[in-house]
């Protein structure tokens, strides 16, 4: 349920109304925008008398929300959410709300020389965050599984060298303590509906990059984000990374329509991972351009200094030179769209 409040209502009056809802066992999500102040009421609202609420003199209107996702719903929070990632004292990287972010780096952290050189290369080209897998979910048990805890330590070393905040994927809740210094925790496609993990990440106090499952609907995707927000964490970045279809030319099929749909349905920022979607290096630039045009708030691109020898997903990685060329195109396009990089 959404309660739209009249402009310039005293804060004490709002708090009194919130207390009434809380006494009914409901929770309230308070959102104050430039033109609208909204109370999002979450819980069993069938017991609420809408006419009685509407009769309150500080209430402009009351509406029921039919969608199962509430907190991530744009109706609850009309203004775009800006995910803020601290870099250093007084500095931060922002994604959403007019801010565009580029997350770049290798699929896997392989050694200290590799991750530091990659960090410097992508930073020089304009990346705002460094990605790198320490724990790797692989289809085959015989494939490289990542350097794990050592990989996270090497990512932190690269962060010290460049100042780039780091993004890395968590695979198991037992590893959460190891991620205490990771700036953005990534939930991979395979864990999108690991609800126990999502609940815990809702209380971790860190930004979360949530990838869409390869066979999940947009509603299921948003419900997974709802699990995180229900725990109190609103710093969520949605990532479209392609879905599985009958097409076999590309690794997955990039659902470009998901970008404007998610922007319409939710206030959370949306980034696109063209690397996993395509699996083909020469498709990265055109898919990146299409993503920006569709309204994406950022990109996530795999970059490796020598893709042919990469320990994981080398076939879909681009070289630093190709990334630099892509960034030259993207920078001008982002500015044209009126966003800040």
Image (cartoon, rainbow, N blue to C red):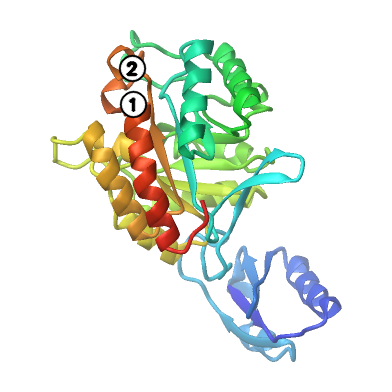
Q: Residue at x 23, y 43 (%)?
A: 253
Percent of width and height locating residue 219: 39, 55
Tell me the tag on residue 69: none
Which quarter of the rendered picture does the N terminus lie within?
A: bottom right
Q: Residue at x 59, y 82 (%)?
A: 62
**In the rendered image, which residue does mark 2 sit on?**
306
- The answer to the question of whether label 2 and label 1 lie on touching residues, with beta carbons closer than 8 A, is yes
Asked whether 126 or 32 is in front, the reply is 126
Q: Secondary structure at mark 1?
A: loop
Q: Secondary structure at mark 2?
A: loop
Asked whether 191 or 26 is in front, the reply is 191
Q: Is residue 148 left or right of residue 7?
A: left
Q: Residue at x 41, y 59 (%)?
A: 262
Q: Is residue 14 left or right of residue 163?
A: right
- Mark 2 to mark 1: distance in Å? 7 Å
Residue 257's place in the image compared with 150, above or below, is below
Q: Residue at x 14, y 35 (%)?
A: 248
**In the rendered image, which residue does mark 1 sit on?**
319
How many numbered dots are placed on residues in this image?
2
Give neighbour class at mark 2: few <14, some 14-19, many 20+ (Cα, 10 Å): few
Q: Is residue 240 left or right of residue 186?
A: left
Can residue 159 be seen at all in this image of the molecule? yes
Give neighbour class at mark 1: few <14, some 14-19, many 20+ (Cα, 10 Å): many
Residue 249's place in the image compared with 53, above or below, is above
Residue 326's place in the image compared with 172, above or below, is below
Q: Residue furthest top?
A: 142
The mark nearer the N terminus, 2 or 1, is 2
């Amino acid at each position: 349920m959404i309660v739209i409040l009249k402009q310039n209502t005293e804060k004490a009056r709002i708090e009194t109304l919130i207390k009434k809802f809380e006494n009914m066992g409901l929770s309230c999500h308070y959102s104050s925008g430039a033109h609208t102040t909204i109370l999002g009421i979450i819980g069993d609202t069938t017991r609420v008398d809408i006419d009685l609420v509407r009769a309150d003199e500080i209430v402009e209107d009351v509406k029921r929300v039919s969608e199962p996702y509430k907190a991530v719903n744009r109706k609850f929070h009309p203004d775009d959410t800006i995910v803020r990632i601290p870099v250093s004292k007084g500095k931060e990287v922002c994604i959403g709300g007019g801010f565009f972010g580029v997350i770049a780096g290798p699929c896997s952290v392989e050694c200290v020389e590799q991750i530091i050189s990659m960090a410097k290369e992508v930073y020089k080209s304009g990346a705002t965050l460094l990605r790198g897998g320490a724990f790797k979910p692989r289809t085959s048990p015989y494939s490289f599984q990542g350097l794990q805890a050592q990989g996270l330590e090497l990512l932190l070393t690269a962060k010290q060298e460049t100042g780039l905040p780091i993004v890395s994927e968590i695979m198991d809740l037992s590893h959460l303590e190891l991620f205490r210094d990771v700036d953005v925790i990534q939930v991979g496609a395979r864990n999108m509906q690991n609800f126990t993990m999502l609940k815990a990440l809702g209380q971790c106090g860190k930004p979360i990059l949530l990838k869409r499952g390869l066979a999940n609907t947009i509603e299921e995707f948003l419900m997974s984000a709802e699990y995180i927000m229900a725990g109190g964490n609103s710093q969520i970045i949605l990532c479209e990374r392609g879905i599985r279809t009958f097409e076999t030319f590309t690794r997955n099929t990039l659902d470009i329509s998901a970008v404007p749909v998610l922007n319409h349905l939710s206030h959370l920022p949306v980034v696109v991972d063209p690397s996993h979607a395509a699996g083909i290096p020469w498709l990265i630039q055109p898919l990146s351009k299409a993503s920006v045009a569709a309204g994406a708030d950022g990109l996530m691109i795999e970059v490796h200094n020598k893709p042919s020898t990469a320990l994981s997903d080398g076939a879909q990685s681009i070289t630093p030179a190709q990334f630099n060329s892509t960034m030259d195109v993207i920078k001008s396009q982002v500015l044209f769209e009126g966003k800040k990089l």
